[in-house]
Amino acid sequence: MAETEKELKQLRMRMVDLAEKSYCNNQYTFTGFLSLAEQSEFYQIQREISHVDYTMWGGMEACERQMLRFGSEEMLGYEEPFPIKCICIEPLMQKFADKFTHRDFLGALMNLGMERSMLGDILVKNNTGYVYCVETMTEFIVNHLDKVKHTHVKCSISEGIAGDGQKLEEKSVSVSSERIDGVIAKLYQMSRSSSLEHFRLKKVFVNGRLCENNSVALKSGDVVTVRGYGKFIYRGVSYMNKKGKLCIGVDMYIS
């Protein structure tokens, strides 16, 4: 993840170069997987390269880490898929396996010397990991990853998890207004001051864009991510209760 101003500048320049290469050479160009913060950097410069079509995709719906593709069938006259594959990582003997988390799979992959931009989202289901990665790294991972923590594993190319791999849970809460800071505080059971701190630390994203305005009013369909807490889809106001509070509905992403 790009963190320093120098790294962010290099990232923006790289995106502009890829966009212009796509436009001038009549070809698709791709970034590696981008974090939410890096995606937000793209939106900052989007106007500069508005003459170039783009798409973001992470391998399945609702992926947080996404690859940016410049070019489109309308612009170039042909279609080219994203170079993304999914790898299934499962214990050789599930009965005796360690209990795995997202961090365990990520650590094992990073120990192979891989860059984070080569890896997309990692989903864990039934103690099995599903890793989205850059297509060119598929063979390397399958041939070299044989252990996660103390457990021997096997890797294979997968079609991914059926559906989007993430479940949604409907939830209703009462709030004073549709302001994003109040909604976040209520949903994640934190104080308003704690909610404001997440904006200060640049941990709140709306529809993939960094949100630094804590007073913005949410709109139906907005996808909100609070780093370290989770993600939800805002569904809007259902009704006003007798105390004058707004009863709002959201769909919370759950593991």
Image (cartoon, helix red, strand yellow):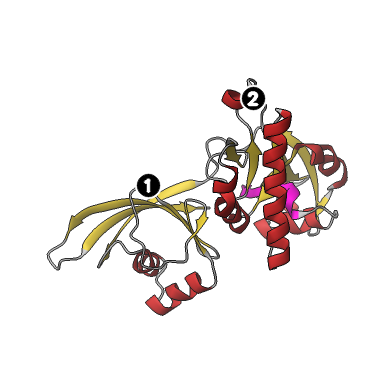
**Label 1, residues with CA under 10 Å away: few <14, some 14-19, many ≥20:** some
Which residue corresponds to mark 1? Answer: 221
Circle 1: residue type? Gly
Residue depicted at 65% across the width and 38% down the height: 69
Magenta-colored span: 116-126
- Inspect this view and state whether residue 214 appears: yes
Give the mark nearer the N terminus: 2 vs 1. Answer: 2
Label 2 and label 1: CA atoms lie apart by 31 Å
Q: Main secondary structure of the magenta part?
A: strand
> For this rendering, which residue is in front, 12 or 83?
12
Query: What secondary structure is marked by label 1?
Result: loop
**Label 2, residues with CA under 10 Å away: few <14, some 14-19, many ≥20:** some
Which residue corresponds to mark 2? Answer: 76
Residue depicted at 39% across the width and 71% down the height: 189
- Location of residue 70 in the rendering, given as x and y in whole percent from the top left corner: 64, 37
Q: Quadrant of residue 162?
A: top right
Whether residues under marks 2 and 1 lie with C-beta atoms below 8 angstroms apart, the answer is: no
Residue 60 image label: none
> Is 28 colored magenta in this rendering?
no
